[in-house]
Image: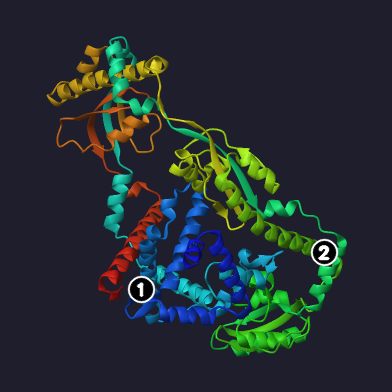
Amino acid sequence: MLQELRDKSTGLFAKIIMGFIAVIFALWGTDEFFKRGASAGKTISVNGEKITETDIARGIQNRKQQIMSRYGESVPAEYLTDEKLRQPVIDSLVQRSLLAQVAKKGGLAANTAALNNEIVSSPAFQQNGVFNQDRYLQLLRYQGFTPATYHKALSEDAMINQLQYSIANTSFVTPTELKNIIGLSFQSRDFDYVVIPADTAEKAVVVEDKDIKAHYDANAATYTTPEQVAVDYVELSIAELAKNINVTDEQAQKQFEQNSKSFVAKTERQAAHILFEGADAQKRAEEIKAKLAAGEDFAKLATEFSSDSGSKNQGGDLGFSGGDAFPAEFEAALAKLKVGEVSAPVKTEAGVHIIKLLAERGSKPPTFEEAKAGIIDQLKRSEAESQFGVKLEKLKDLAYNADHLSEVAKELGLTAQNTGLFGKTGGKDLTANNAFVTAAFSAEVLEQGNASEIIELEPSRVVVLKKTERKPAQLQPLESVKDQITALVRAEKVQVLLAEKAKAVVSAVSAGSPLADQAKALGLEVKAARGITRTDTATDRDVMQYVFGLAAPAGEKPVPGSVRTSKGDFAVVALNGVHLGSDEKVPAEQRASISNQLANINGEYDFKSFQSHLQETAKIKQ
């Protein structure tokens, strides 16, 4: 029994259990849970402040989400393991803790009203353009936050940003530094060059059968088609099951009546405010309150006088609150208002507010017509979830001994499909899913011919697969790739011959022979480039980039060199002179722009150095 429980404690079964836990959290809250967890799971001390196992787990989950969001399902599974991500997350949390400590010690603080406005105005927490408390709490729970811990995280982010700004923006560039940078950036160069075309070596190159055979033998892996496999698969998902479930109006009406009996009014209030900060905040608030009493427009006054930059341009609109989005004093005053009424000045940590109640909702149950579509979806999903659990257990049992998955699909009322051949690098749709590909090429499926274990694509979507065809890796016959190899070998020989010619010319120029004489001997023309800058477009780009990487001539003797161009030719150059740019010739606006860019770069380095210093001097215990 215990072994069976351990076996089922991973994958889908574990997620179902976690789903029940999530429901408990939703009903009773999670603050106390995390407080207990934080004290029980202290793992790292940073100058006496703790980073808990909960913090690390949340950081790992967020890092996984970031990686998946950026790269999709093509990310190899090993890059998303907790073991792989744990140390980078710990390093990040330690650095964050150090910066937050310095910010607090330095007296930096976050504006509470601004943070609240950031929350209620975030599109992620909105529904139909307005703040939705349920969505807000749901997303926070998904990321492992409570409202308190999320607000704390936002506050620390704001303080760390202030700290970074205050350090990075103290950097500056001296006149000498600016002059040197301008001199290097706007320098010009004088050089001569000759291009040795690839076609001059083509006629001299002969590719023999032994060359082709040698290349073929040395690069066998290149000419081997990778192993491929085709599988039948049966997919089971709640979403697909729900599509085939019918719900009658009578069933919907019955559910509506049950919902109505258990309906609990939850009033949400849409607030607008005008915020005043500073020593004279109360006085200015009373003056604006008088203007409102005289009939002036609230939204217009908010736009003109509010200190809250996040809401002032929306007439002070902060969106809806279920009673806990704003500070307690703010919420208390808001609850006393009727729609359209304006409060007396209310003082909070953020300053002094004048509050207006714009609208209320949620105090009355919806009508049947308003709720019908949602109830039908609810009933369909509920029935689909029930079917999903039953069919999942049958799928496990039936697939285990099945000769063909089509038989399994038929018995479950599902459809078996075939992927066609695909390789270990995957393909598209399901064959682009790393877990699916890994299972298809596992020894159990590929070698033993068994059906795979249940593959969990999502918590409510699984698939099982079984091999139908296997195409092993095969070395292609030499004759089928002979033309391809001939072209490659010819190109390689051409490049070797060109490189030898270029090397000979460079050696001659180094010994004192003029580049013009060497070019004449090859029947080629020397091109003169004078006063060429980095932005020149007339000169061959590869040649120019190479020339600007050469050291300046020490005397009258030119500096030679050679470079392969993107066209496959070789160019031999002779650098004759380097002329530094003059800051006097650069417009004042451009000089200022360059100076600001350099200061920003220096500021970034300063901040990184500051971070390194904090890390080196911190007392960190793991």
The dot on residue 372 is: 2
Q: Is residue 32 left or right of 500 when viewed as pictured?
A: right
Up/down of 597 relative to 525, above or below: below
Identify the residue shown where x is 54% and y is 51%.
455
Q: CA distance from mark 1 to mark 2?
A: 53 Å
Q: Between 128 and 184, which is closer to the camera in this rendering?
A: 128
For the C terminus, the image quarter is bottom left
Identify the residue shown where x is 38% and y is 73%.
97
Up/down of 340 relative to 157, above or below: below
Residue 383: image location, x then y, percent: 73, 60
Q: Is residue 214 left or right of 392 when viewed as pictured?
A: left
The residue identified by callout 1 is 98
Q: Between 127 and 521, which is closer to the camera in this rendering?
A: 127
Of marks 1 and 2, the one in the foreground: 2
The dot on residue 542 is: none
The image quarter containing residue 458 is bottom right
Helix, strand or loop under label 2: helix
